[in-house]
Amino acid sequence: MRRKLVDEAKEEAQRLLKRIDALERCAGWTQWTVDGNKATSKPHIDDTFNSGEFTAAVRRSSLDLTKALARLRRG
């Protein structure tokens, strides 16, 4: 397993998590307090993310991570 492939997969995973954070923040799903994220500790009223640029960014990042993981498995 090559270090380059491992680093690439790590970067794609971090990118996906950043995109998910942005999606949740823009949808109003986060309410950080000292005790943690109050919004995700209980069910949200609308349990779906509607289409938009942030949803598309998460999907693209997910696809990029899938590709990086496939290269990691092959390498």
Image (cartoon, rainbow, N blue to C red):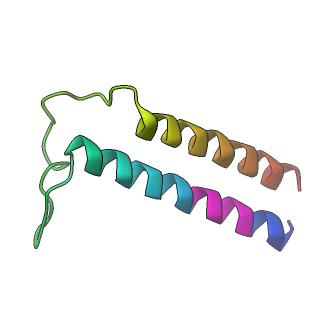
Work out whether residue 45 or residue 53 is closer to the camera in this orientation and state it: 53
Looking at the image, residue 39 sits to the left or right of residue 4; the answer is left
Count of number-bearing discs: 0
Q: Quadrant of residue 9?
A: bottom right
| Residue 24 in the image, given as x and y percentages of width and height | 30, 47
| Residue 13 in the image, given as x and y percentages of width and height | 57, 57
Looking at the image, residue 60 sits to the left or right of residue 67; the answer is left
> Could you tell me which residue is drawn at 86 percent across and 68 percent down?
2
**Residue 32 to residue 65: above or below:** below
Looking at the image, residue 15 sits to the left or right of residue 22; the answer is right
Looking at the image, residue 33 sits to the left or right of residue 5; the answer is left
Quadrant containing the N terminus is bottom right
Name the chief secondary structure element in magenta.
Answer: helix
> Could you tell me which residue is drawn at 15 percent across and 37 percent down?
43
**Residue 44 to residue 67: above or below:** above
> Could you tell me which residue is drawn at 55 percent across and 58 percent down?
15
| Residue 28 in the image, given as x and y percentages of width and height | 19, 45
Span highlighted in magenta in the image:
7-13
Quadrant containing the C terminus is bottom right
| Residue 23 in the image, given as x and y percentages of width and height | 36, 45
Does 68 lie within the magenta span?
Answer: no
> Could you tell me which residue is drawn at 20 percent across and 53 percent down?
30
Work out whether residue 63 or residue 69 is closer to the camera in this orientation and state it: 63
